[in-house]
Image (tube, grey):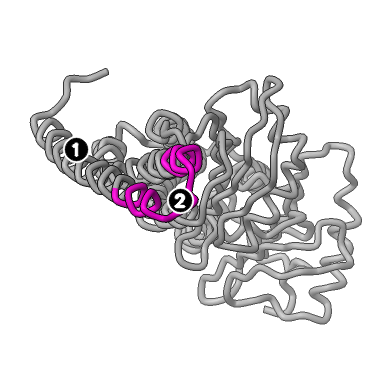
């Protein structure tokens, strides 16, 4: 644990003094009201001493419960300053990935919310394109017994806190809540918490505000850092293919196409792709599953482009009559189309995530490299069936 900063000390003192003053005033008020109530009851004929004692006891219990809740409410605003430590580490790039952010967030939730009526015992965080992170790995079974896929699906359909009932962990009963994390119209993931008691509406509202005002915007910063790292690495890797061209490593355009396809497929984690150019009569194919027969997909697209113009702009389309449904088409345009890349997947999520990055590389780097390679190899236009209408 690092040394406490001077500003943190004054914040703690301020909140501590304010809390003590308000709780002292509250206790004084409860005692005064209790005494007056008992005195008034005592003056009523027929009210025995036993009833007075019971009333005094119930007033005390009610005062303690309300006081404990008030204590939580007074402590909650201090979360702003405790969460600043996470914000500062994001700004300093000490937190530079969604996984690290999720670890810090789960630890923060379990260490901060330790109140009698608002205690988070365990937490887990799922961030888009990142594995779920748990404050304690022993809760893995409890989370997945609650139908993890269902939790994931529900969090994508609402911004409200979701209550999923009681769950047993180590033979103890806890209440499971899910906080979907959204930024505008974009779903970023969710936060799961196990609490020792069922939360009142006030605490649920506070959790929703905490996600809305603190978690989502910081998560966007972390995702931006991750995206920038991916982008830098992506351009570096693509540049390596360009260097191979200038070094005359490639003897045919198909060798270059397969390298590019394999890299794009692995980067987007899609299932495969096709790469057709005007310099070849056939197209190159790469699929992660080596047992998959790409010839059927090739034939399908030959027929498809027999009646369809090559797109002049990149696009993501759905084609239900192929095994993968979603197709990301990246045309390579230089005055006219000189090639087109197809990437295939069962979902369009990763295509949309990498869309701008791949389109920019296609329009600038791959387009230039393909013409450069064709020039080195002294290739002429062959009239590829995929591109015959351009």
Image coordinates of residue 358 in percent, x first then y, are 53, 56
Q: Residue at 72%, 63% (x, y): give it.
A: 327
Q: Does residue 213 sit above or below 56 in this rendering? A: below
The magenta stretch spans which residues? 36-57
In the drawing, what numbered circle is on residue 203? 2
Of the pair 203 and 231, the residue shown nearer to us: 203
Q: Residue at 66%, 42% (x, y): give it.
A: 262
Of the pair 236 and 367, the residue shown nearer to us: 236
In the drawing, what numbered circle is on residue 47? none
Kindly indicate the quadrant of the structure image that contains residue 147. top right
Q: Residue at 87%, 72% (x, y): give it.
A: 303
Q: Does residue 335 sit above or below 274 in this rendering? A: below
Image coordinates of residue 224 in percent, x first then y, are 39, 50
Q: Does residue 364 sit above or below 120 in this rendering? A: below
Image coordinates of residue 268 in percent, x first then y, are 61, 48
Of the pair 266 and 336, the residue shown nearer to us: 266
Kindly indicate the quadrant of the structure image that contains residue 286. top right
Q: Give left or right: position of 75 versus 133.
A: left
Which type of secondary structure does the marked residue at label 2 adopt?
helix
Residue 55 covered by magenta stretch: yes
Q: Main secondary structure of the magenta part?
A: helix
Q: Quadrant of the C terminus?
A: bottom right
Q: Which residue is mark 1?
A: 20
Say whether residue 246 is visible. Answer: no
Which type of secondary structure does the marked residue at label 1 adopt?
helix
Viewer-nearest of discs 2 and 1: 1
Image coordinates of residue 337 in percent, x first then y, are 60, 72
Label 2 CA crowd tier, 10 Å (few <14, some 14–19, many 20+) = some
Of the pair 320 and 68, the residue shown nearer to us: 68
Q: Quadrant of the N terminus?
A: top left
Q: Residue at 13%, 34% (x, y): give it.
A: 13
């Amino acid at each position: 644990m690092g040394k406490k900063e001077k500003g943190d000390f004054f914040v703690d003192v301020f909140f501590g003094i304010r809390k003590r003053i308000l709780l002292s005033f509250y206790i004084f008020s409860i005692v005064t009201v209790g005494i007056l109530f008992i005195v008034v009851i005592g003056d009523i004929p027929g009210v025995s001493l036993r009833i007075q004692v019971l009333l005094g006891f119930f007033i005390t219990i009610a005062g303690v419960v309300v006081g404990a809740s008030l204590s939580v409410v007074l402590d909650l605003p201090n979360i702003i300053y405790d969460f600043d430590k996470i914000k500062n580490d994001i700004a300093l790039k000490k937190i530079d990935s969604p996984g690290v952010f999720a670890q810090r967030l789960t630890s923060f939730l379990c260490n901060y919310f330790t109140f009698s009526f608002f205690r988070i015992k365990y937490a887990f965080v799922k961030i888009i394109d990142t594995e779920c992170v748990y404050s304690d790995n022993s809760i893995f079974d409890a989370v997945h017994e609650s139908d993890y896929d269902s939790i994931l699906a529900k969090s994508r359909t609402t911004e409200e806190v979701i209550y999923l009932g009681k769950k047993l962990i180590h033979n103890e009963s806890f209440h499971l809540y899910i906080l979907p994390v959204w930024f505008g119209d974009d779903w970023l993931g969710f936060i799961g918490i196990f609490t020792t008691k069922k939360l009142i509406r006030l605490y649920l509202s506070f959790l929703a505000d905490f996600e809305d005002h603190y978690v989502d915007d910081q998560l966007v910063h972390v995702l931006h850092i991750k995206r920038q790292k991916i982008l830098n690495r992506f351009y570096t890797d693509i540049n390596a293919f360009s260097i191979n061209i200038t070094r005359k490593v490639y003897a045919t355009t198909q060798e270059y196409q397969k390298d590019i396809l394999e890299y794009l497929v692995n980067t987007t984690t899609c299932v495969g792709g096709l790469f057709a150019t005007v310099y070849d009569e056939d197209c190159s194919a790469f699929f992660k599953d080596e047992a998959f027969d790409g010839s059927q997909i090739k034939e399908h697209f030959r027929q498809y482009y027999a009646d369809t113009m090559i797109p002049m702009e990149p696009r993501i389309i759905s084609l239900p009559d192929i095994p993968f449904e979603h197709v990301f088409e990246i045309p390579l345009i230089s005055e006219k189309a000189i090639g087109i890349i197809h990437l295939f997947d069962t979902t369009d999520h990763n295509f949309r995530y990498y869309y701008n990055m791949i389109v920019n590389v296609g329009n600038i780097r791959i387009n230039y490299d393909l013409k450069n390679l064709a020039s080195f190899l002294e290739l002429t236009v062959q009239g590829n069936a995929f591109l015959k209408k351009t």
